[in-house]
Amino acid sequence: MAHEGHERILAVQDAPSGLRAWIAIHALDPQPAFGGIRILNYRSERDALFDGLRLSRIMTYKCALAGVRGSGAKTVVIANSILDRPAAIRALGRHIESLGGVYQTGPDAGFTREDQQVLMQETQSVAHFDVDGGMQSAGDATAEGAMHGILRALQLRSELQVDEITVAIQGLGEVGMSLAKRFLALGARVVAADVDKEKSAAAEKLGVSIVSSQQVLAANCDVLVPCAMGGIIHDVTIPQIQAKIIAGVANNTLGHKSHAQRLKENNIDFLPDFALNAGALIEGSHHFHTKETSCPDKIAAIGDTIEHVLMRSMNDNISTVDAAFAIAAEKVAGS
């Protein structure tokens, strides 16, 4: 743990509600530490801890790349141990509140709007207040930033205009659906897949072509956007991909860091998730520091970040993931 440089690692338990969680704070300089709450099934507390340590460390680099005044943290909750979800969320909120504001949290995988309402009964340390605080939803903010990054990557390839492209979206949750609407509005063709039939039907009414989860990764498209769970780009799926750009909107899109180099060798631009999906972080941190609810220029700057990463990858002949980590490490060292 010390090797990873974590400032605080807290085990959080509440027996009556079945809450078992970890709060991992990678750094406290600069303050605060930003990081969402992830609620997923884990095989063990060790697996949950490993996930929290890894994600909180990445959040420090994400903050640096996004120009956010703060550091990284993450809460991981073992969903399969919960007995009473509202009580568990309230107990977690009390633990977060006891940290005195050094950790500002927000939504992550498995964390719902209902969870947010319960959490905010116990703590004010929520960086992204969603629409209830006058801000756009975290999903919309993430989609807004990702759109800017994708558009910049398309410009750098100089192959097609946005109204000539096909975008394939895997996962029609809040972020995926918002991205679909945005690219449809720009005149792009959008194909998508989701296991939820209601979400698929809603997207189809908007003009999205629905395909199966197996077909979407191999779709004849210009941009592939994984928006569901991570690890979807790996040895089996890479040979099927026809896209010129893979936009890592889902956290941990790659099965392994080495897959970024393989994509580069296949002339596929991979846009690293921790560089691309920072819209909600940027908006939440801006609100925390200024109390303002909108910062479109800062979110649009994700396009500049993606350009920096792609140019560094090309000039240094390294993968885009290595390029993004190098840029972030330089920013952290210089702060």
Image (cartoon, rainbow, N blue to C red):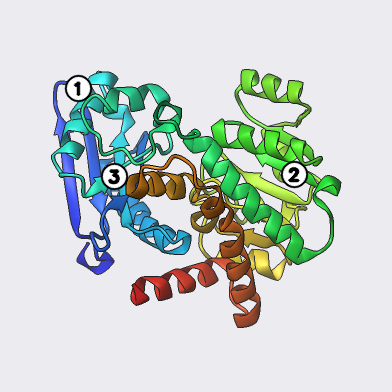
Callout 2, which amino acid? Val
Callout 1, which amino acid? Ser
Q: Which residue is mark 3?
A: 104
**Earlier-in-chain disc, 3 versus 1:** 1
Name the residue at 23% across, 43% down: 22
Q: Which residue is mark 1?
A: 17
Q: Position of residue 52 (x, y in %)?
A: 31, 49
Callout 3, which amino acid? Gln
- Label 1: which secondary element: loop
**C-beta proximity under 8 Å, tags 3 and 1:** no
* Apparent side of residue 7 relative to residue 293 in the rendered image (left or right): left
Q: Is residue 171 visible?
A: no
**Earlier-in-chain disc, 2 versus 3:** 3
Q: CA distance from mark 3 to mark 1?
A: 23 Å
Q: Quadrant of residue 31?
A: bottom left
Q: Residue furthest bottom?
A: 316
Q: CA distance from mark 2 to mark 3?
A: 34 Å
Q: Which quarter of the rendering shows the C terminus?
A: bottom left
| Other residues around mark 1 within 10 Å, as few (<14) / some (14–19) / many (≥20) | some
| Other residues around mark 3 within 10 Å, as few (<14) / some (14–19) / many (≥20) | many
Q: Position of residue 113 (x, y in %)?
A: 41, 25
Give the vertical position of 230 relative to 131 (above or below).
Answer: below
Q: Position of residue 21 (x, y in %)?
A: 24, 38
Q: Which mark is residue 167?
A: 2
- What is the number of callouts on the image? 3
- Label 3: which secondary element: strand
Q: Quadrant of residue 95?
A: top left
Name the residue at 81% across, 40% down: 187
Q: Which quarter of the rendering shows the N terminus?
A: bottom left
Q: Nearer the viewer, mark 2 or mark 3?
A: 3
**Earlier-in-chain disc, 2 versus 1:** 1
